[in-house]
Image (tube, rainbow, N blue to C red):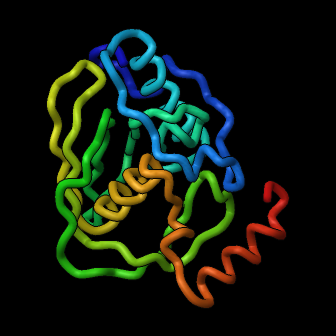
Amino acid sequence: MRHGSIPGAHGRVRPLTLLGDPLLHTPCTEVTGSGPELIRLVEDLFATMYAAQGVGLAANQVGEARRVFVYDCPDDDDVRHLGHVVNPRLVEVDGVVVRGPEGCLSLPGLEAGTERYDHAVVEGFTMTGEPVRVHGTGFFARCLQHEYDHLEGRVYADRLTGWRRRKVRWQVARASWG
């Protein structure tokens, strides 16, 4: 991302990895080093996220099993949070557990009430190697936990139980992409 440019303006929209692809259930590998390849990946993630009208996107959702995600997500007070994290670690989750609607670009058109903490902290690095610590509350905390899960090889549907889990499985089986 060039300084002062709009995230994703220089990226290309990549095809999304959809549920059923083993990559979504494989933990991603640490990113080593930085440079043009990592900058391109971050730019492509932003371009793809915006094209798909999402609020976050992890690298394995575009076929790259690397620990990187981007976000452009509001919190519950409608404050916009924009950024990316390389090699993130979820260092804190607390507060109340809230069941809220959650969707995913890798499960297009589906949504389910998913339990998440309403506060989360992620630490990692920027694509230029600067340390970053991101605090999220409400919907943005949900986004951080969701994207972190992707890098661990999980999708939100893996967190569902009972009838919610059965309903999503039924919907996936009948989806045009399933």
Where's the N terminus, which quadrant?
Answer: top left
Picture mark count: 0
Q: Residue at x 75, y 73 (%)?
A: 171
Please tell me in which quadrant of the rendered image residue 146 appears.
bottom left
Q: Is residue 150 left or right of residue 124?
A: right
Residue 7 drawn at (x, y percent): 40, 28
Position above or below: 85 against 119: above
Please tell me in which quadrant of the rendered image residue 12 appears.
top right
Which of the pair 73/19 is nearer the observer? Answer: 19
Q: Is residue 34 left or right of residue 69?
A: left
Residue 164 drawn at (x, y percent): 59, 84
Which of the pair 43/65 is nearer the observer? Answer: 65
Where's the C terminus, which quadrant?
Answer: bottom right
Q: Is residue 44 left or right of residue 116?
A: right
Q: Residue furthest top?
A: 36
Please tell me in which quadrant of the rendered image residue 143 appears.
bottom left
Q: Residue at x 68, y 35 (%)?
A: 15
Q: Residue furthest bottom?
A: 163
Q: Residue at x 28, y 42 (%)?
A: 88
Residue 124 drawn at (x, y percent): 22, 38
Position above or below: 81 against 63: below
Q: Residue at x 58, y 49 (%)?
A: 24
Residue 160 drawn at (x, y percent): 52, 78
